[in-house]
Image (spheres, rainbow, N blue to C red):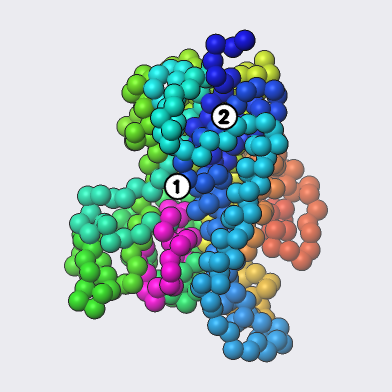
Amino acid sequence: MSEYDYDLFVIGGGSGGVRAARLAAGLGKKVAIAEEYRFGGTCVIRGCVPKKLFVYASQFSEHFEDAGGYGWTVGESRFDWPALIANKDREIERLEGLYQHGLENAGAEIIASRAELTGPNSVRIKSTGRVVTAERILIAVGGKPNPHASLPGHELCISSNEAFHLEALPKAVVIAGGGYIAVEFANIFHGMGVDTTLIYRGQEILSRFDIDMRRGLHQAMEQKGIRILCHEVFAKIERGADGRLLAHTSTGKALVADQVMLALGRNPNTAGLGLEAAGVKTGQKGEILVDEYSRTNVESIYAVGDVTNRVELTPVAIHEAMCLIETLYKDNPTSPDHDLIATAVFSQPEIGTVGLSEDAAAKAYDELEIYRAEFRPMKATLSGRQEKTIMKLIVNAEDRKVIGAHILGHDAGEMAQILGIALKAGCTKDDFDRTMAVHPTASEELVTMYQPSYRLKGGERV
């Protein structure tokens, strides 16, 4: 009989934690998983899933406008925010139930409570005070929005968490940030008819993306009517006499809004977790430091997902969890593969990307071929919409391998998933050229760009 209460104790019921618990329990291990809020984690409860539902909702205003060019007469339309919130909540509740049923069916014990480490092999269940032991402990508590506590008036602001539960749709919103969350919510609110301003301290939004995607999306957003203020930060937020908010910027502007949203990054959710008691080392942001097999400096404690601050994406957390189970319980040491991760920004238009940006590739490779196409998508020809699609392939000139693929346009995220397979397989530009086009589609441009738009050698155009 084991000297421990559990073979595996998982702290955190998000995508990574649930996958690890379910797989381990399915192998016959005695598993418990503790979650203090709701099962599904950020992605399901107040992240990717409800965000994508909001994106769909916000697109209908343009669909209605475009319909006229195709012969449809659309009657008076009206947006009902409470109806969207109620329908979203029902869907999230359904998905949460599926997560819990999956755990129960696998035989994992579900503990609806916060859990904190008390040592290398022990955990306190906060709701009861009971201390349990486990041979191995997995921390998968994710991250939380940075509250930007140094900003005067930050307590008047909302984060993405609260944006999913607003009682009323604001008439005007100001969003601080230039990453995924800020950009996506700017498009969401604007599509729902909200006067929207985005403020960002940097030179251009989406700092880690390819420059053509960044500039193209910036232009498209401003053409829609979203105000983007770069090289700006908030100085303070205050409540006006009329009850609305005044967001004062570093350059002296006073932006009036009903809601001010801070999307200024996320922090690992490790405060008060008992890491010190267990001797677990953390990094500068509070992230849990792990090796290539997701093991901390404490042999019995592991961590996956956003809490490690490696790659903050839901599929990555799930992949890390699956690799961990292979390592711990299948005698198959497996290190997570963080190379060539395809991703999407669900802006309007979308960005889909995999591999290196042009700037990053120029630093890593001596000579590059850049293939670039910019065109008005076919759907826009009758609708009269002026937005452009941009497609770009980054090719290492030495071996012709495609090392980056970037798309700005409708369904770019869907295309990025397929491109991820091609780049992961090591496809060359010749492989792309040999592939027959599907006509008429936007994606056919990916296999019909036969001549490079320009070349780079030593980081300079030649």
Q: Position of residue 414 (x, y in %)?
A: 66, 54
> Residue at position x 65%, y 37% from top?
103
Front position in the image: 188 or 446? 188
Residue receiving disc 1: 208
Pick the front one: 427 or 318: 318
Q: CA distance from mark 2 to mark 1?
A: 38 Å
Q: Nearer the viewer, residue 142 or 129?
A: 129
Boundaries of the magenta span:
161-187
Of mark 2 and mark 1, the one earlier in the sequence is 2
Task: Residue at 63% x, 31% y: name it.
Answer: 108
Q: Quadrant of the N terminus?
A: top right
- As drawn, 305 above or below 203: above
Residue 356's x, y, as percent? 53, 42
Q: Is residue 413 left or right of residue 128?
A: right
Q: Please, what secondary structure does the residue beneath circle 1 have?
A: loop
Q: Position of residue 100 (x, y in %)?
A: 62, 42
Q: Is 179 within the magenta?
A: yes
- Disc 2: which residue: 32
Tag 2 and tag 1, C-beta contact below 8 Å: no
Q: Residues within 10 Å of mark 2 (few under 14, many from 20)?
A: many
Q: Position of residue 412 (x, y in %)?
A: 62, 57
85 horizontally vs 99: left or right: left
Badge nearest the viewer, 2 or 1: 2
Residue 333 colored in magenta in the image: no
Judge left or right: residue 204 versus residue 447: left
Q: Which residue is depicted at the point 40% across and 45% down?
A: 144
Q: For the residue labelled by badge 2, is the local secondary structure a helix, a strand or a loop?
A: strand
What type is the residue that disc 2 sits on?
Answer: Ala
Query: Amino acid under label 1?
Result: Arg
Residue shown at 61%/19% (left/top)? Answer: 328
